[in-house]
Image (cartoon, grey):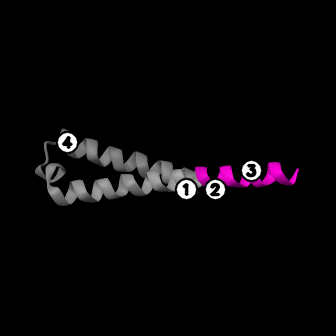
């Protein structure tokens, strides 16, 4: 699963860079920026929640040992 999330981040950044390079007015529009911000926020939330989950599991394992 992390591989697909990393690839999604890459493709999101790639699409944004291509749109900026082509000087597209869409890339600077409010709806596109809002969707892009939402996507980056979801990616960050995924990795943050995964880190918190792994930390809690390691603490439980260290207490049990």
Q: Nearer the viewer, mark 4 or mark 3?
A: 3
The single residue placed furthest to the top in the displayed view is 21
Under circle 4, the secondary element is: helix
Residue at which label 1 appears:
49
Q: Write down the region rendered in magenta.
A: 51-65
If you read the primary sequence from the N terminus, does the residue marked by circle 1 or circle 3 appear first?
1
Earlier residue among tags 3 and 2? 2
Q: Residue furthest left?
A: 25
Gap between marks 2 and 4 measured at Cα: 36 Å
Does the segment drawn in magenta span residue 62? yes
Q: Residue at x 60, y 52 (%)?
A: 52
Instruction: Report the mark closest to the observer, 4 or 1.
Output: 1
Q: Earlier in the sequence, mark 4 or mark 3?
A: 4
Q: Are marks 2 and 4 in contact (CB under 8 Å)?
A: no
In terms of secondary structure, where does tag 3 sit? helix
Which image quadrant is residue 18 in? top left
Q: CA distance from mark 1 to mark 3?
A: 15 Å
Res 53 label: 2
Query: What's the CA distance linking mark 3 and mark 2?
Result: 10 Å
Kindly state the secondary structure of the residue where label 2 is placed: helix
Q: Is residue 4 left or right of residue 41?
A: right
- Tell me if label 4 and label 1 are in contact, CB under 8 Å: no
Nearer mark to the viewer, of 1 and 3:
3
* Residue 6, percent from left and from top: 49, 48
The residue to which callout 4 is attached is 20
Question: Considering the numbered disc 1 on the image, is that residue within a helix, a strand or a loop?
Answer: helix
User: What whole-number distance in Å separates the C-alpha atoms at marks 1 and 2?
Assistant: 6 Å
Closer to the observer: label 3 or label 2? 3
Q: Is residue 34 above or below residue 14?
A: below
Residue under the image location 47 percent in, 55 percent down:
45
Tag 1 or tag 4, which sits nearer the N-term? 4
Q: Are marks 1 and 2 in contact (CB under 8 Å)?
A: yes
């Amino acid at each position: 699963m992390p591989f697909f999330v990393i690839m999604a981040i890459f493709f999101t950044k790639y699409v944004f860079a291509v749109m900026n390079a082509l000087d597209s007015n869409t890339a600077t529009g409010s709806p596109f920026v809002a969707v892009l911000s939402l996507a980056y926020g979801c990616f960050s939330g995924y990795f943050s929640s995964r880190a918190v989950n792994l930390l809690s599991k390691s603490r439980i394992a260290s207490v049990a040992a």
